[in-house]
Image: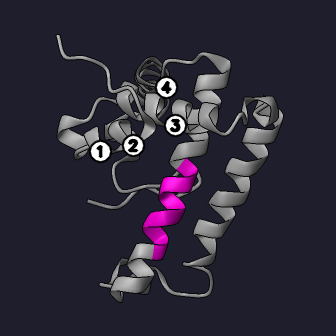
Amino acid sequence: MTDQPSSLRQRIDAISDDPSTPVGQLRDMVSHFVAERDWRQFHAPKNISMALAIEAAELMEHFQWITVEASRAEMEPDKRAAIGEEIADVMCYAMALCNEMNFDIATLMREKMKKNVLKYPADEFRGRYGKEDPPKEA
């Protein structure tokens, strides 16, 4: 078993990439960032959820008024980096909310996907966004 990093900097430096970084390690990094600044006093679920919504809106601003095709097209590196920072902000607040409310992210995701599989059967929803979207003809 490896030793837990002692400082926030060590925690940050220990983060690698998606395939090799457990969700718990990301949550731990966010938790220590908040603790070092004594911000838990401000991290009521109400406040974090509002901050998360604001960051999600900032993410949406990058795609406002452009076409679906343009949103999928290759972007300038600066624009792509700015979008990535907004995604990170959204993820940090989501993890902070899970930390504050003692939710296990993997469990939440697993249980929600089980419900989604039942709510949106692949055979019924393949190529459709919802019940009001007519089925594609074969």
Residue 111: x %, y % from top left? 46, 19
Q: Do the residues under discs 3 and 1 have CB atoms within 8 angstroms?
A: no
Mark 3 element type: helix
Identify the residue at image location x=75%, y=33%.
Answer: 43
Q: Nearer the viewer, mark 3 or mark 4?
A: 3
Q: Which residue is mark 1?
A: 13
Q: Do the residues under discs 2 and 1 have CB atoms within 8 angstroms?
A: yes
Residue 54 highlighted magenta (yes or no): no
**Farthest residue toward the top?**
1
Q: Which residue is mark 2?
A: 9
Q: Nearer the viewer, mark 2 or mark 3?
A: 2
Mark 2 element type: helix
Residue 119: x %, y % from top left? 50, 30
Q: Which mark is residue 112?
A: 4
Identify the residue at image location x=54%, y=44%.
Answer: 92
Residue 86 highlighted magenta (yes or no): yes
**Farthest residue toward the front?**
6
Q: Amino acid at mark 2?
A: Arg
